[in-house]
Amino acid sequence: MLQLSPEEWTAVALSIRVAGWATLLSLPLGIATALLLARRRFWGRELLNGLVHLPLILPPVVTGYMLLLLFGRRGPIGSLLEETFGIVLAFRWTGAVLACAIMAFPLMVRAIRLAVEAVDPKLEQAAGTLGANRLWTFATITLPLILPGVIAGAILAFAKAMGEFGATITFVSSIPGETQTIPSAIYALIQVPGGESGALRLTAVSIAVAMAALLASEAVARLVARRIADR
């Protein structure tokens, strides 16, 4: 069994905390964006699609630097948040949540969008003809059918957030106990003599958490799909 040091346990706990919040906070927006891209035709749709997937193409360091320019204490959004609500994101674990959510968002949206596009729109139209409003139709027809995709998207986003490095270290640095997640802790350990063993331990933990998340997503998605088929 791995014997992690207190500092390594802190990095693991912080990574799970950051990835969990990044996934939960971005999930509603991810579902809404996927529905919009899959079901609506409007001016600027391709532009929105490009913006959603932009973090996949840009170097993560560029994304982190853009976040620093916008959400740093001297940035237009960051200064407004600090002056109005007392919220500081740069060099805080909450900033790591923001960076991880943005980097993982494209994977989440893509998985959910594929699930939405697989749903026959006639089922939703039939519910509408029976008097159901859009919200009720979504809750009773659309959401149950796309639930495997939602789960898959959430797990993919969680795994991506757990492994995010470039954007987070640029935006929030690598402060032990505050913003040092597993990837940044591994990077710090391999820079010092004798740190290889700690880096290997954290690498093993990272692989184990990622595999557990993927296996859990597959199991839950199969269970949900089986229950839908039995209805």
Image (spheres, helix red, strand yellow):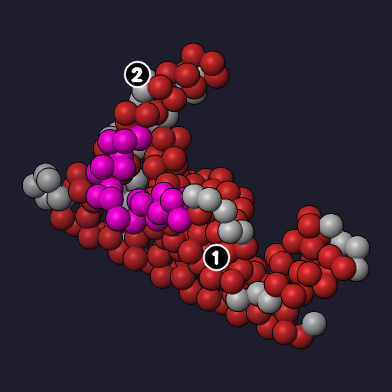
Q: Specify the farthest residue to the bottom.
A: 230
Residue 134, position in %: x, y?
A: 79, 57
Q: Is residue 127 above or below residue 63?
A: below
Instruction: Report the quarter where the C terminus lies.
Output: bottom right
Residue 211, position in %: x, y?
A: 41, 70
Q: Is residue 126 above or below residue 106?
A: below
Q: Which residue is mark 1?
A: 113
Amino acid, disc 1: Arg
Identify the image quadrant of residue 133.
bottom right
The residue stretch that appears in magenta: 46-67
- Front-most of 116 and 180? 116
Identify the image quadrant of residue 124.
bottom right
Secondary structure of residue under mark 1: helix
Secondary structure of residue under mark 2: loop
Residue 158 visible here? no
**Of the two numbered discs 1 and 2 in the rendering, the one whose residue sits closer to the viewer:** 1
Q: Specify the farthest residue to the left.
A: 193
Q: Which residue is mark 2?
A: 74
Amino acid, disc 2: Arg
- Front-most of 170 and 67? 67
Query: Could you tell me which residue is drawn at 34 percent across and 66 percent down?
Result: 207
